Image: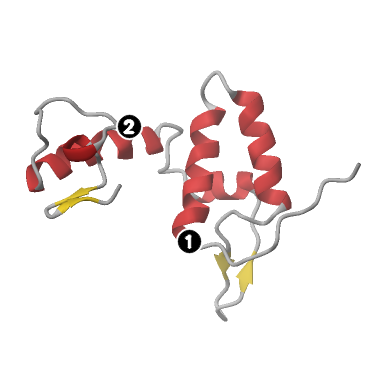
């Protein structure tokens, strides 16, 4: 039975970059096969960030091309971002329990909290 391909829709740049960062993170850890499968699908469905030429035309890039053109992005770049978000948010909107940081927090511990409450 053939797999149906997902409907093609424009992918926002931040979403494409997140896919790339997830693949980059997985590629250096114990889930390397998962990273390989993810990279195959990202390339197959053209979900990676595109490159612009000097005329403003978009061109697809492979995962390896992205790695080479973004040498400043280490495999743990996504982890570093996650580690920095909590302390930055805590300065602006203090949590109900200080020094307890989790990506999975709820209510006043949520990373999605706002000054008026939580988004979720």
Residue 59: percent from left, percent from top: 64, 66
Q: Residue at x 52, y 25 (%)?
A: 28
Mark 1 — residue? Answer: 13
Circle 2 crowding by C-alpha within 10 Å: few under 14, some 14–19, many from 20? few
Rendered image quadrant of residue 56 = bottom right
Q: Looking at the image, tell me whether mark 1 or mark 2 is earlier in sequence order.
A: 1
Q: Residue furthest right?
A: 1
Q: Residue at x 58, y 62 (%)?
A: 50
**Residue 33: mark:** none
Residue 112: percent from left, percent from top: 26, 46
Q: Is residue 53 left or right of residue 21?
A: right
Rendering colour mode: secondary structure
Q: Quadrant of the N terminus?
A: top right
Q: Is residue 1 left or right of residue 47?
A: right
Mark 2 — residue? Answer: 104
- Real-space Cα separation, disc 1 to disc 2, in angstroms: 24 Å
Q: Residue at x 53, y 46 (%)?
A: 19
Q: Residue at x 27, y 51 (%)?
A: 119
Q: Is residue 14 left or right of residue 67?
A: left
89 shown above or below 10: above
Question: Which type of secondary structure does the marked residue at label 2 adopt?
Answer: loop
73 shown above or below 69: above
Eye-nearest disc, 1 or 2: 2
Q: Nearer the viewer, residue 82 or 27?
A: 82
Residue 98: percent from left, percent from top: 9, 28
Circle 1 crowding by C-alpha within 10 Å: few under 14, some 14–19, many from 20? few
Q: Nearer the viewer, residue 3 or 29?
A: 3
Question: Which type of secondary structure does the marked residue at label 1 adopt?
Answer: helix
Residue 120: percent from left, percent from top: 30, 47
Rendered image quadrant of residue 89 = top left
Q: Nearer the viewer, residue 75 or 35?
A: 35
């Amino acid at each position: 039975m053939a797999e149906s391909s997902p409907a093609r829709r424009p992918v926002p740049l931040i979403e494409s970059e997140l896919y790339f960062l997830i693949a980059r993170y997985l590629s250096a850890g114990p889930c390397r096969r998962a990273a390989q499968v993810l990279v195959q699908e990202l390339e197959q469905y053209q979900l990676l960030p595109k490159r612009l030429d000097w005329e403003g035309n978009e061109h697809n890039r492979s995962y390896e091309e992205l790695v080479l053109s973004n040498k400043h992005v280490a495999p743990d770049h996504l982890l570093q971002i996650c580690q920095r978000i909590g302390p930055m948010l805590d300065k602006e909107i203090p949590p109900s329990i200080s020094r307890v940081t989790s990506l999975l927090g709820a209510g006043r511990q949520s990373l999605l909290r706002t000054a008026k409450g939580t988004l979720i």
